[in-house]
Amino acid sequence: MKNVLVISLVSLLAIACSRPSPYKEIMKDSMRTSISWRNDTTGIWESAGWWNSANLLTAVIRYSEVTNSDDLYPLIEDVYTKAKQYQIGTDSTGTPLYCRNFINDYYDDEAWWALAWIEAYKITKQKKYLDMAEVIFEDLTGGWSDECNGGIYWKKNPLHYKNSIANNLFSLTAARLYKTTHDKKYQDWFEKNVAWYMQTGMINTDIYQIEDGTNKDCLPNQNQHYTYNQGVAIAVLAEMYLLNKKQEYIDLAEQIAMATINKQLVTEEGILREMNPGIDKSNDGVQFKGIFIRHLGFLYQVTKNPAYKDFILKNAESIKENNYDPISKSFGHYWYGPFTEPNAAANSCALECIIEAYQLTK
């Protein structure tokens, strides 16, 4: 009888371990919906926008990674081929104006694309994607100046505004290019820009939140806290920890993460949101929460802090139960619900949380 009991327990354990993730089907349906909204002519998600499309592509790449599937590799290639020369308008004579090699007038836009192509290279091993990321990074370095003692600008033509998102994306791109190529020039840029950023005051250590940027006097503006700023910052700090093993960086990353998920940018029920609900539905802010979760997932990989796993799963469950439309098979703007309306960026934003939840439960 004892042997039978042992066999039965082993069988039950095998069944339990083989149960599919509760997020698998809804993730697949939402990804199909996302793909259906892409413009086959331009290669991007026109209804989401330019920089958002880099993040929608990143969700496709991450989906491919966690599902261990190459089914969407042709889509990645299609975006690369068609969008690397993207028409952004016409001049006064009607001559088309193009954004070439994913380079435009906004350094943060460019960095989103560079990071996407690094991830595309990692899963496909197509070197042209890595080459493109390096081309984009070279343009990013043109945003550096000695004003405010360093850092890159957010916008060019004319150069304007040194802020958190552009600089943390610049640092993160440098870190990941270094990890991928082992070219020391990327390490040098990474360490140089992080050292500058750490002394700007944009990390508000009174509340452990990232301020949006600097004023004309080079001092940080206050009380503009967005989820994506927190997310990219914790990824940068985690990468710096992985590079030099200095505990101060991972401690700071965790303080920012814990403040975000427990106090600053959550509902009373602990569901991620922006400070102003209107931001969740704005053209840019609609993408922010998914970016935070993506990088919180990375921080979890580094620290294995169960609080991050619990937060991701709690939010994924709220998205699944309160923010999903079975008719359009898509997610809406507010993760605590109710579903608002079909929107490519909102769907992708929530999908990023579902993808991370799937990775944690598969």
Image (tube, grey):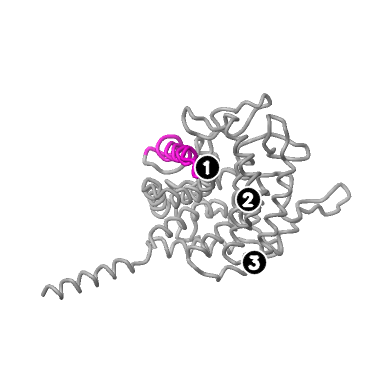
Between circles 1 and 2, the one closer to the viewer is 1
Residue 76, label in figure: none
Residue highlighted by disc 3: 126
Between circles 3 and 2, the one closer to the viewer is 3
**Residue most extreme to the top:** 217
User: Residue 105, position in %: x, y?
Assistant: 74, 44
Amino acid bearing label 1: Leu
Q: Residue at x 37, y 45 (%)?
A: 307
Mark 1–mark 2 CB contact (< 8 Å): no
SS of the residue at dot 2? helix
Q: Residue at x 41, y 60 (%)?
A: 23
Q: Earlier in the sequence, mark 3 or mark 1?
A: 3
SS of the residue at dot 1? helix
How crowded pointer 3 is (Cα within 10 Å; few <14, some 14-19, many 20+) is rated as some
How crowded pointer 1 is (Cα within 10 Å; few <14, some 14-19, many 20+) is rated as many
Which image quarter is the N terminus in?
A: bottom left
- Label 1, label 2: how many angstroms apart (C-alpha)? 18 Å
Whether residue 4 is situated above or below residue 82 in the rendered picture: below
Q: Residue at x 52, y 40 (%)?
A: 230
Q: Residue at x 47, y 58 (%)?
A: 355
Q: Which secondary structure type mostly characterizes the magenta part of the structure?
A: helix
Residue highlighted by disc 2: 112
Amino acid bearing label 2: Trp
Residue highlighted by disc 1: 237
Residue 143 among magenta residues: no
Mark 3–mark 1 CB contact (< 8 Å): no
